[in-house]
Amino acid sequence: MEFVEPIRDKRKIEAMKLVLRGSNLRDYCLFVLGINSGLRVSDLLRLTIEDVLNEKGKVLDRITIREKKTGKTKTFPISSNSKKAIEEYLQKRGSYLRSEPLFISRKGNTAIQRVQAWKALNNAAKAVGIKDRIGTHTLRKTFAYHAYKQGKDITLIQKLLNHSAPSVTLRYIGITQDEMDDVYLTLNL
């Protein structure tokens, strides 16, 4: 697996949203939910309609999944941006069964594959001028990077990602030695 980067520039995130929304609401929804949940792509692609909607067809406030990699149960709230993306996508998608994959392929009732998600993300990234290596894992890294940049405690982010140590999380989100050195150089108390 190739090492990928988070999308650090919020303007690039917004530009990618525009590109994806304009080309394919499914891919837009995948992107928005991915960068707002921190889920691994394997867990995103396993989501079903019933994982995100109640019996009345309304988007749930929380998603509960069993993580594929760890086998652990994870419950988290759905952000307002994610809710809107899910609603818009499912409205455009039309009829569906509650047991169907959320991110359905064009060929039928199976979920899109990781390579399809990768292609959609890469094409959108290229369209907005992102030069860094982008992949499906970029969604999870982008979530963690921006949580860190907003001042969220690194140990909390570590826990959200199920990492073993804060140093693993810092390396994972691409916090460099230069950025750490900058703290020393700019603090000047």
Image (cartoon, rainbow, N blue to C red):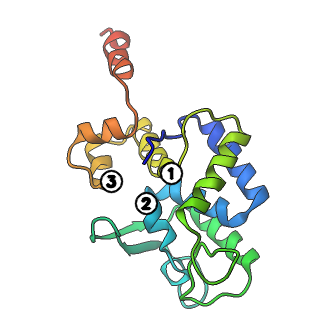
Q: Is residue 16 above or below residue 183?
A: below
Look at mark 3 in the image and give the residue it sits on: 161
Q: Is residue 40 visible?
A: yes
How far separated are the C-alphas under marks 3 and 2? Answer: 8 Å
Say which quadrant the C terminus sits in: top left
**Please, what secondary structure does the residue beneath circle 3 have?**
helix
How far separated are the C-alphas under marks 1 and 2? Answer: 8 Å
Look at mark 2 in the image and give the residue it sits on: 39
* CB contact under 8 Å: marks 1 and 2: yes
Left or right: 110 in relation to 72: right
Which is nearer the eye, 113 or 104?
113
Going 51% across and 51% down the picture, which residue do you hit?
139
Which circle marks residue 139 in the picture?
A: 1
Label whose residue precedes the other's in the sequence (1 or 2): 2
Q: Is residue 12 above or below residue 178?
A: below
Which circle marks residue 17 in the picture?
A: none
Mark 2 Cα shell of 10 Å, populated few (<14), some (14-19), many (≥20): many
Q: Label 1 is placed on what type of residue?
A: Leu
Label whose residue precedes the other's in the sequence (1 or 3): 1
Going 66% across and 82% down the picture, which residue do you hit?
108
How far separated are the C-alphas under marks 1 and 3? Answer: 12 Å
Q: Label 2 is placed on what type of residue?
A: Leu
